[in-house]
Image (tube, rainbow, N blue to C red):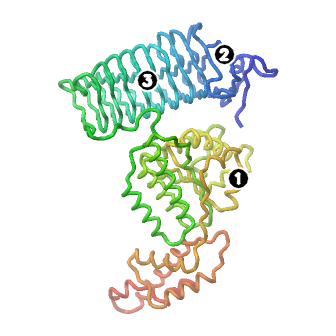
Amino acid sequence: MAQTVTVSPRRTGAYPTIQDALEIATDGAVISIEPGVYLEALRLRGRRLTLTAAADPGSVTIDATAADGSAVACDSAEVTLRGLVLAAGDYPAVAAAGGRLQIDTCQVSAGHAAGVSVSDGARVQASDVKVVQGQYGIVIEDAGGILDKCEVRNIADDGIIVRLGADPTIRNCTIEGCGFRGIYVYQAARPTIERCDISGTGDVGISVAHQSSPTITNSWVHDTHGVGIMFGRGCGGLVEGTRVEDTAVPGIHVDEGATPVIREADDTAHRPKVGVSAIEGATGQDAEKVDKLLAELDSMIGLGGVKAEVRALIDEIQVNEWRRDAGLAVGAVSNHLVFTGAPGTGKTTVARLYGQLLKALGVLPNGKFKEVARRDLVGQYIGHTAEKTTSVFEEAMGGVLFIDEAYTLSRSSGASADFGQEAIDTLVKLMEDHRDRAAVIVAGYTAEMADFLDANAGLASRFAKTLEFENYSPQELVLIADRIARNDDYLLASGVDDALFEWFSQIERDQNFGNAREARKLLEGMRKAQSGRLRALGRVPGRDDLRTLVLDDLLAATR
C-alpha cells in the first residue's frame, strides 16, 4: 500500500506544511491535504507523488503569488495533482519539465505567465482543469499528452499554445474570452483538436504557423474578432466536421503555400456537441447500425436473460441521449459491466457486441475491444503494476477493456507484495475518472467474481450491472454444434443430432464445463475421425463424403 502523509496546520500528528510532508514522503506516497490556504511554492525533482485535497475539490489552495516560483514545479517527476486550487504570480502556476504530470479537477491561475506549462518531453494528462487567469492559459512545448474537458477562460493573450513539435490531444475543451488567439499552433507542432469550443477571442480562433500540421475535427469556432482558423505558409493538417461561424471573413484563411485538407461542415447540420459538456466520442446515433447489432445479438443461441439485460441497457442509453439532445438533465451513467458464468457461454462475443453498440449509440468513439488477463495488468515490483494497468487502460480508451478471469487479481500469489490488489485499486480510480471514455467488463466464474468485487470498497459500485451467463442446455449445444459445422462447410448426417443431444445430456457439468467450447472440441474430434474414415475408403471421396459427418465419427470422437 502507498504511504499516506496528512497535512494540516490544525490537526495533531499531521504535518503543518506541504513542504514538511514532502521531506519525509517516500516514492509513490500520497500527500493528503486538509482544507486551507497554503502559502508555498513546491519543487518536485525526480519525485513520484500524489498531492490531493483530503476533502472536496477546491477546498485546498496552494498560493505562490508572493513567492519566487510556481505553486508546483515538477522536474523529471511523476506527479498527480487532484482537487487543488493552484495560484502563482509571474511564474506558471503548474510547471512540468520532463516526466509525467496528471492534473485532475483543479483550478489554476497565474499573473504574467501561463496557468500550466508542460515542456521538455513531459507527458501530461489533464482532466476537468479550469484555467481562470494568466498571460497564457496552457503552454505545451516539445511535449504531449491529453487535455480532456478542460476550460480556459478570460486569458490575457493566447488560450492554449502548442509549439516545438508538441503533439497533444486536446478534446472536449472550452476556450473562451482570450485576449489574442484561442489556440496558437506553431514551430512544427502536431496537435489533435477534437470536439472543442473556441469563442470570444480578440483575434484568430485557431492560428497555425511555422510548418505545423494540426488535426481539427468536430469542433466549433465562433464569435471571434479575427478569422476562425488561419493556416500560414508551409503548414498542413486537416479540418473536418468543424463549424466556423460569426468570425471575420473568411472563416478559414489559407496562406499561399499552405496545404491543409479542409472538409467543411454542412451548413444545414446542427452545431456539433463540443466543449466540456460533451460526452467523449459523442458522434450521433446510428440507428441502422444499432438495429443490425441487436439482430446479431438475437441470433446467438440461448442467453435469453443476457439478451434482455443488454437490450435494457441499450434502451436506457438511447433514451438518455435523446434527453441530452432535448436539453434535459441526464444523470451520470456507468457503462462498466460484470459478466459471470462458466466458460464458453458467449461472454467475450457479447462484450465485443456491447462495445460496437456503444459506438453506434455515440457513447464511445471507436468501440474497439481489448481483452486482457492478470499477466497484462500485474507487474513484478512496487509501482510497476499501476504503470502497466494504466497503460492497458489508456490503450483501451474509447472502447471496451475486457478482463477475463478478473477474480485472479484478488488472489494472493503468495508473495509478500500483493500486486493484484494494486491493479484493482488502480482500476477503481481509472474507471471512475474515465467512465465516459471506456467501458470495463470483468468476467469469470460466479462465486469467484463475488469475492473479486469485495476486494476494494468502491469496486462493486463502479459497475452498472451484473449479467449472469447460464450454461447452455443440451438442445442449445446441439444447435451450436450444428451452426459451427455449417460455418465450416460440414453437414451432420441423419441421426447425429439425436446422438449429440444424448451425449450433451449425460456429460458432467461441473464448474469447468466448457459449454460452446465443448461443442467445438467435439466437432474437431469428429473431423479427425472423418479424415481417418475417408482415407480408408480406397478411393477419392466425393463432395458429399467430404462434407458429411456421420454417427461413426461421433462415436470415435467420444470414445
The crowd level at tag 2 (other Cα within 10 Å; few <14, some 14-19, many 20+) is: few
Q: Quadrant of the N terminus?
A: top right
The disc label shown at residue 140, or none: 3
* For residue 164, side relative to residue 509 (left or right): left
x, y (%) of residue 328? Answer: 49, 41
Which of pointers 3 and 2 indicates the residue nearer the eye? 2
Q: Amino acid at mark 3?
A: Ile
State the mark number for residue 423.
none
Q: Amino acid at mark 2?
A: Val
| Chain-order first, disc 3 or disc 2 | 2
Placement of 482 over or under 67, stated as above or below:
below
Find residue 182 and report its image quarter: top left
Residue lying at 68% horizontally and 17% vertically, measured from the top left: 19
Please tell me how crowded label 3 is: few (under 14), some (14-19), or many (20+) other residues with Cα within 10 Å: many
Q: Secondary structure at mark 3?
A: strand
Up the image or down, 196 lies above or below 351; here it is above
Residue 49 in view in this figure: no
Pointer 2 residue: 37
Q: Residue beneath label 1, please?
A: 411
- Secondary structure under tag 2 reads strand
Residue 273 vs residue 473: left or right? left
Percent of width and height locating residue 201: 36, 19
Q: Quadrant of the C terminus?
A: bottom right
Residue in the image at 45% along x and 91% along y: 494
Q: Is residue 130 left or right of residue 47?
A: left
Residue furthest out toward the bottom: 538
Question: Mark 1 to mark 3: distance in Å?
Answer: 42 Å
* Element at label 1: loop
- Determine the CA span between mark 3 and mark 2: 28 Å
Please provide percent x and percent y for residue 389.
Answer: 58, 43
